[in-house]
Image (tube, grey):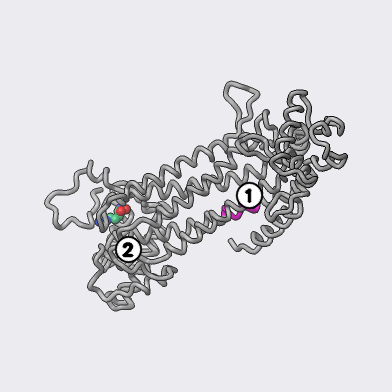
Amino acid sequence: MATQKLWGGRFKEPLAEIALNFSSSIEFDRHLYEEDIAGSIAHVEMLASVKVLTSSEANRICTALNAIRKEIKTGKFKLTSEYEDVHSAIEQRLTQKIGALGGKLHTARSRNDQIALDERLFLRSSIKEINKLITNLQRVLLNKAEKNYGVLMPGYTHTQRAQAVMLSHHLLAYINMLERDYERMQDCSERLNKSPLGAAAFAGTPFPINRLKTAKKLGFDGIVENSIDAVSDRDFIIEFISGCSLTMMHLSRLAEELVLWTTKEFSFAQISDAYTTGSSIMPQKKNPDMAELIRGKTGRVYGSLINLLTTMKGLPLAYNRDMQEDKLPMFDTVKTVRESLLVMAHVLVHTTFNKFHLEEELRTDFLTATDMADYLVTKGIPFREAHRITGEVVQYCVTHKMYFGNLDLATMKEFSPKFEPDIFDFILPQTSVKRKQSAGSTSPQEVKKQIKNWTQTLRKRKV
Ligand code: ARG
């Protein structure tokens, strides 16, 4: 069926099929039909309130729009590629249903302000969803931190073993990162919650519309005041994707740790069978694909960020058709981030830590070397010298294939007469963490405090 264009009057020839196929956005902007109809209803009600439409006209249009929403939802009206975009499809269907009156819907409006509105509404609800998922993942991490309270593990810098830390402390670090992601989403949502509707094409409209009224009806905090700005910018989508890029960066680091931790080499943790996959050729394999995919999908989100930044770069004001390309990266990012947050939470729920192995690893290494140096400092030796002495002890152990636990006092005294029998307690991993005093450190009291604070924060959070 040949569909009616919204702009046919000026043209002698219809749009070539190849040009329509190339320029149609319906394949992706059909996901915005709910937002589009909500915006149209608010617009029509406002037009009636300022008497541009009669209330009976407005009622008939709104009733039909509500019916169209149902038709789309149930698949009775299909948003197929013969339409230029979701806006044209809905307006055309409206005219089919109520005749020429349908043509009044677009009074004092343009697809330029319409699409900017749809996108803001879409992102506002997507952010709510994403923040729910962030909170859920934080709760899962908190639960793991509570359950594993007391378990120690090797902490790393440069992927080299560094100092003993509490596993809970490590997991809590991710809760903190995710909290900033949550706040960034919240900020973004507040900033984008302004209505562009009423900007019309870009210059405004001579009709006595009330922009604030439509804004309020749609739950916005106000209007994007400058009508040229309202239809020209997509900074709110870019800001959203950039916030999501940071979330994905955090998820990919956690994913990477899961990949490492579940190797034979680390053996720190295992993921249950339901969240791992096998190999088509190597029967023994159990692969952490979910974590790898989260790590991999991070690249897609970064790509979307650069995609849209590049699309927008150098565009003259106001609307340009280039901007239609904003929807693919926006939808893809929402989908990717939502799925990644959800899958990560499931994977973590089904991950168990090998407590005994972690502790064994602490014993067979030099993770308390810093504590040995600190010990000498408490005996009056300057830290730099204490560092050198301890380094020599480590070198001795490496040469003799032993660990701190195998040393006796006489040997230690050869490195420094300041070593006394209490050194042996001092260099136990448990003592090491307990002796930490600084705020936010890995000491059991500090970690307990953090767990308590996060329990309160996350319990209070209504999402
Ligand atoms: N499909 C278009 C987009 O997404 C809607 C706005 C079209 N405006 C126009 N003047 N052609 O950007």
Residue kind at label 1, given as amino acid type? Ala
Per the image, the residue denoted by label 2 is: 230
Question: Which residue is the extreme one toward the top?
Answer: 281
Quadrant showing the C terminus:
bottom right
Assess whether residue 136 is covered by the magenta stretch.
yes
Q: Circles 2 and 1: CB distance less than 8 Å? A: no
User: What is the CA distance from the residue labelled 2 to the residue labelled 1?
Assistant: 39 Å
Residue drawn where x is 60% and y is 55% of the image: 135
Q: Nearer the viewer, mark 2 or mark 1?
A: 1
Residue drawn where x is 22% and y is 44% of the image: 19
Q: Is mark 2 within 8 Å of ligand 1?
A: no
Where is residue 90? Give x, y as percent.
Answer: 32, 58
Q: Is residue 58 above or below residue 148?
A: below
In the depicted view, which residue is nearer to us: 274 or 184? 184
Mark 1, secondary structure of its residue: helix
From which residue to which does the magenta span run? Answer: 133-139
Residue kind at label 2, given as amino acid type? Ala
Per the image, the residue denoted by label 1 is: 173
Question: Can you tell me which quadrant of the image ligand 1 is in?
Answer: bottom left
From this viewpoint, is residue 131 visible? yes
Which circle's residue, 2 or 1, is located before the other in the chain?
A: 1
From this viewpoint, is residue 151 visible? no
